């Protein structure tokens, strides 16, 4: 299967991609405030690229449970200088983590090749038109509700079936809107309107979500479900995060989103070797 993101062209199965997180926010759940200054965010992005990240994901709005929405202008003010600087300083694709089409548009103009959309809105015409017209890669993530209230009472009859069905409908709607399926990566949205048991069920069945043979991405890094299982606070969730990442790789997941790039790259490469996968090829850029 192929994934196209502007000038980048990835082939899976191949090397699992590691997406390093740069949160330009005062309030992200695990690193809020550390990289709010553009210079700190850029230095962090360069560090993650040096640790082996394949993609950098730049976000200007925390979507932790209960987080307030950030106005569009403020999100643009946070992420655009960082994207512009990193575009010049690192040789890997930049992704923008946003739900807002105007933020995505500014980020693409600044050099982003991927839109990581956690939105899950029913009306996505503007965002999808932008993705179609620019040829960027698009991460389509499932969320039940809105960050402000999504953890109040998440409920599903069958979380695995419902998330899969949502992907089927979304992909159909995207194709009708003119996107190529080859632009799309699917993400079950661990922790986004899900209880512990929902997260565990989704991860157990993670290879079931490659609807239309689309690559799957997983974001488990430092998340609270790991804390619930292990009784670990946010800074102590790296071992649990790596266990989930290795599990996902063993199930054929194409991309892991993480705050801890160096450790994740090692864990992922080791898992690939144990699985006997050739990780030399599979990733290209034109
Ligand atoms: N998780 C977070 C943010 N964006 N995007 C995708 N596609 N998948 C995820 O699982 C995902 C995501 C939450 O992590 P983080 O960015 O560190 O936290 P915050 O939203 O508080 O900034």
Image (cartoon, rainbow, N blue to C red):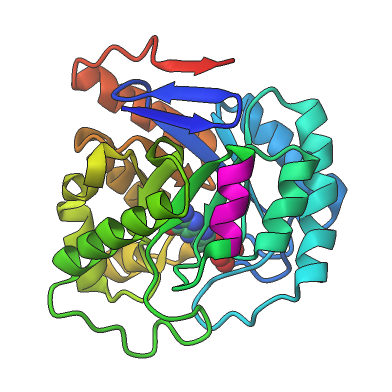
Q: Residue at x 22, y 59 (%)?
A: 164
Determine which quarter of the picture holds residue 184: top left
Give, as a single range, the part of the protein colored magenta.
126-133
Magenta part mainly helix, strand or loop?
A: helix
Placement of the C terminus among the 4 image quadrants: top right
Front one among 128 and 203: 128
Q: Is residue 208 above or below residue 182?
A: below
Q: 250 left or right of 38?
A: left
* Horizontal and vertical percent position of residue 61: 66, 67
Please determine whether, in this image, residue 244 is positioned above or below residue 67. Answer: above
130 falls in the magenta region: yes
In the image shown, does 103 or 27 lie closer to the viewer? Answer: 103
Horizontally, is 2 left or right of 165 in the view? right
* Residue 162 appears in the figure: yes
Q: Position of residue 76 (x, y in %)?
A: 79, 60
Residue at the image point whose x is 54% and y is 52% from the top: 116
Q: Is residue 210 visible?
A: no
Where the N terminus falls, by quadrant? top left
Q: Write down the quadrant of residue 85 in the picture.
A: top right
Q: Quadrant of residue 62?
A: bottom right
Q: Position of residue 177 (x, y in %)?
A: 46, 54
Instruction: Compare residues 200 and 103 and report the one nearer the observer.
Output: 103
């Amino acid at each position: 299967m192929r994934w196209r993101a502007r000038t980048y062209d990835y082939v899976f199965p191949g090397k699992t991609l590691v997406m390093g997180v740069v949160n330009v926010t005062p309030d992200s759940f695990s690193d809020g405030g550390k990289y709010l200054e553009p210079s700190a965010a850029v230095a962090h992005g360069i560090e993650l690229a040096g640790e082996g990240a394949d993609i950098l994901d730049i976000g200007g709005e925390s979507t932790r449970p209960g987080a307030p929405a950030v106005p569009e202008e403020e999100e643009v003010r946070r992420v655009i200088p960082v994207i512009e600087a990193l575009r010049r300083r690192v040789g890997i694709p930049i992704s923008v983590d946003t739900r807002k089409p105007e933020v995505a548009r500014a980020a693409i103009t600044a050099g982003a090749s991927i839109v990581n959309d956690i939105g899950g809105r029913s009306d996505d015409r503007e965002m999808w038109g932008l993705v179609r017209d620019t040829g960027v890669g698009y991460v389509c993530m499932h969320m039940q509700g809105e960050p402000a209230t999504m953890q109040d009472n998440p409920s599903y009859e069958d979380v695995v079936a419902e998330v899969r069905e949502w992907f089927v409908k979304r992909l159909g709607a995207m194709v009708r809107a003119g996107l190529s399926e080859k632009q799309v990566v699917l993400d079950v949205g661990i922790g986004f309107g899900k209880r512990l048991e929902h997260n565990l069920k989704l991860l157990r069945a993670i290879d079931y979500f490659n609807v239309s043979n689309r690559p799957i991405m997983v974001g488990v890094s430092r998340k609270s479900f790991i804390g619930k299982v292990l009784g670990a606070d946010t800074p102590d969730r790296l071992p649990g995060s790596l266990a989930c990442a290795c599990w996902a790789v063993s199930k054929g997941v194409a991309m892991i989103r993480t705050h801890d790039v160096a450790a994740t790259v090692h864990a992922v490469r080791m898992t690939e070797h144990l699985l006997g996968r050739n990780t030399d090829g599979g990733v290209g850029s034109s």
